[in-house]
Amino acid sequence: MNLLDKLFGNNKNEVAPNIRFGRYTDAYHTQGQDEAFEAAVASFENDHFLPAYVAFFNYLKNDDEGNLHFWEKDGELFFEFYQGSKKVTGYANEKKIYAEAKVAKATSLHSGFMRRLLEENFELKYSRFSLSPDNDLTIIFDSYTMDGSPYKLYAALKELAIHADKHDDLLVDEFEALEIIDLNIKRELPDSEKEIKYNYIIGEIMAAFREIDEGKLNADQYPIAITYLLLSLCYKLDYLTKPEGYMMETLERAHRLAFAKDGKNAAQKNQLLRKELQKLLERPKEKFFKEMYEVSATFGITAPIDHQKVALIIDQELPNMKWYYEHGHERIALAIPGFIAGRCLFYFAVPKPDRDLLHLLLQILEADYFGRLGFVKLFDNGVLDEKGIKQSIRRVAQAHRKSYPRLNPDLKKLVFHSLAKFSESYLQMVRELDLSKSE
């Protein structure tokens, strides 16, 4: 059970349901992991290749995830690790290191997927897609050990693992000639949880579309407001439902389209975002259910940032909610703190106290969804649970104060008379946190 489960139970004697949120990140290294990487580099520079790789895999190993195993036999080092639904296996000796992951089984050789993977190979830097004698689509990396430094190995295995995990669901969904192979699932989700998540996904997309089409705000006149609404939606769906496969790629593509430097204006980009979300509305329910499961991971795709970057994002975006709130567009106003929290949790690996406090904000903003999942509702019938919210913030601070001794959220900044004003004051409180590690 992770820290968020313990922090946000219904009271101090309870824990929340065993439901995970957000993308895995490998940015939160322990001191032991950092020391292992330094040992790997030192051994490699002295041409002690196998000891270097042993230290390297100790660096990658996360006991909480149960993500990696390795062993030595007859002078070789064998390893296997998990990235989402895929297992990567390989070996290393004094001359060579090799790794592979099976992506899908080809029941027939179709030019469509073969061309797709050929194009992918031009984009890959370290690995390559190939076809085994048994018609297994496989992604492979190999290198002479003398060229396989820990820095190169990290980049290469990350590329291989992430592409293997992303492409299995996408390729099988698109090409009938392919079928799932070696699906490694840590935990199947209960159907009741899948149902709640599916209904939330569809309901939130439809609610956003209604706001655009029927709301008081003129969408053509205020396109940036619609961008906030749609991106906030994308980010919270990704973080709160933790999708795999097609939906994950759809939300990532929407993010890329929004920030692409392609000459399109905000209104044009909004149309593209809406088309991507419309695809999810049209997707059969059973396909959503197939992509809802828990997995282990070894590599994260989010970039680590410090608290100053989080504060800068708040400074840049939060003032924009004032006009919408003052002119009666509360849903748009609330989309802005949702956008801030969601973007930080979607695109970055923020410091742990920021992560937990931004999660808590989403738990408040999306209280009905959390309630259906079995979590405490901190906003119910239009009333904020002031005591419960303050207690939850104190628990976050207490959990991280050993690492951040100056962490002392100023609860006096919080305003509880409306959800919008509370969200604004909450992010201002987060912005002012002191996350320096020395007293």
Image (cartoon, helix red, strand yellow):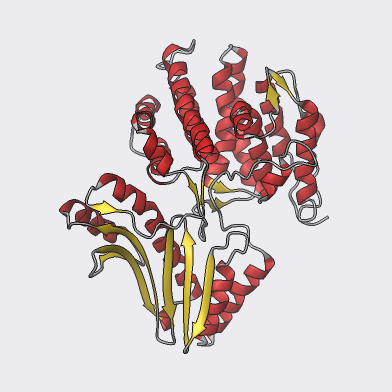
Q: Is residue 53 visible?
A: no
Residue lying at 38% horizontally and 58% vertically, measured from the top left: 164
Residue 50 placed where, x, y %? 51, 84
**280 left or right of 26?**
left
Q: Is residue 116 left or right of residue 86?
A: left
Q: Seen in the image, is 390 located left or right of residue 181?
A: right
Q: Is residue 365 above or below residue 358?
A: above
In this view, 286 is above or below 27: above
The outermost residue toward the bottom is: 74
Name the side, left or right, on which 291 lies relative to 40: left
Quadrant location of the C terminus? bottom right
Q: Residue at x 68, y 33 (%)?
A: 427
Q: Quadrant of residue 287?
A: top left
Q: Position of residue 368 (x, y in %)?
A: 61, 26
Vertical placement of 111 versus 98: above or below?
above
Judge by depth and name the residue closer to the eye, 320 or 209.
209
Q: Nearer the viewer, residue 383 or 34?
A: 383
The image shows residue 177 at horizontal and vertical percentages of 22, 52
Observer-nearest of 370 and 426:
370
Residue 349 rendering spot, x and y as whole percentages = 58, 50
Is residue 9 visible in this depiction of the protein?
yes
Give the residue at x 36% y 74%. 142
Q: How many marks?
A: 0
